[in-house]
Amino acid sequence: MDIRVYVATHKNYKMPLEKMYIPLHVGREGKNDLGYLGDNTGDNISIKNSNYCELTGLYWVYKNIDCEYIGLSHYRRYFTVKPLVNRVLSKDDKFSLIIKEEEALQLLKDADIVLPSKRNYYIETVESHYKNAHHIEDLNKVREIIKEYHSEYTESFNEVMGGKKLYLYNMFIMKKKDFDEYCKWLFDILFKLESQIDISNYDNYQSRIFGFLSERLFNVWIKKHNLKIKEIPVINMEGINWWNKGINFLKRKFIK
């Protein structure tokens, strides 16, 4: 089976050697050549990377690649099927845990899609979390667009927004035909939103609006289509800097 997992990156980084992994330079347009495949050929939105994040790579794959199974990872985040032991791992140790092609194909025998384990927000809903971290009027505008143009997704949208768990990172492995259907739906919504809002006064973080919204919309699409899901852990090559995450959260919440 033809399976490809594109690894979104914006810098040179150690990459998995297994053939199913293909480094993809997202936001390649106007940038120095990293020696990787770029998302700025054929039908592309590479120039929009500062607002769309890894979605510029997603769009490029949607429009320019034909295969049976498709996946998206990140230069520092990968799926794993190995137990994550409670100890400090070296980068080499972590790379040995990255999911292999035969393991991915085995999972897909019994699932429509492979996804990262859900994030649980516990004390707030998906919608209230977005309100606390971003501009809630943008999410409200998405709700209006869905109601007008994709009303069959309204119930799923409301269920996801009222819930407390979310699949994050825009990471997945699934059939390319399902992926294409998802992208057609997703980019129709995001392009409509882009034409209706003004983000010229957003800072660099909030300007990544379409990447943030897509994580929520991905969950809406999954819920609507009632896919058979296999959740597995994600391993972070660089670990998580909780201090910086906390500082950034406080800045977003209290410094307007």
Image (cartoon, rainbow, N blue to C red):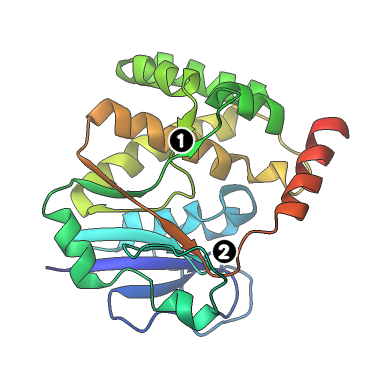
Q: Does residue 151 appear left or right of residue 213 in this picture?
A: left
* Residue at the (40%, 55%) spot, across then down: 233
Q: Residues within 10 Å of mark 2 (few under 14, many from 20)?
A: many
Q: Does residue 219 appear left or right of residue 190 in this picture?
A: left
* Residue at the (34%, 74%) spot, across then down: 21
Name the amino acid type tagged 2: Gly
User: Visible in this render: residue 225?
Assistant: yes
Distance, label 1 to label 2, CA atoms, is: 26 Å
* Residue at the (54%, 30%) spot, across then down: 193
Mark nearest the camera among 1 and 2 is: 1
Q: Does residue 166 appear left or right of residue 249 in this picture?
A: left
Residue topped by disc 2: 27
Q: Is residue 242 above or below residue 91?
A: above
* Residue at the (56%, 32%) spot, across then down: 121
Q: Quadrant of the C terminus?
A: top right
Q: Is residue 126 above or below residue 96?
A: above
Q: Secondary structure at mark 2?
A: loop
> Residue 198 location, x and y as percent?
70, 32
Residue topped by disc 1: 166
Q: Secondary structure at mark 1?
A: strand
> Residue 97 location, x and y as percent?
38, 72
Q: Does residue 118 appear left or right of residue 152 in this picture?
A: right
Q: Nearer the viewer, residue 138 or 86?
A: 86
Q: Nearer the viewer, residue 225 or 197?
A: 225
Name the amino acid type tagged 1: Leu
Q: Residues within 10 Å of mark 1 (few under 14, many from 20)?
A: many
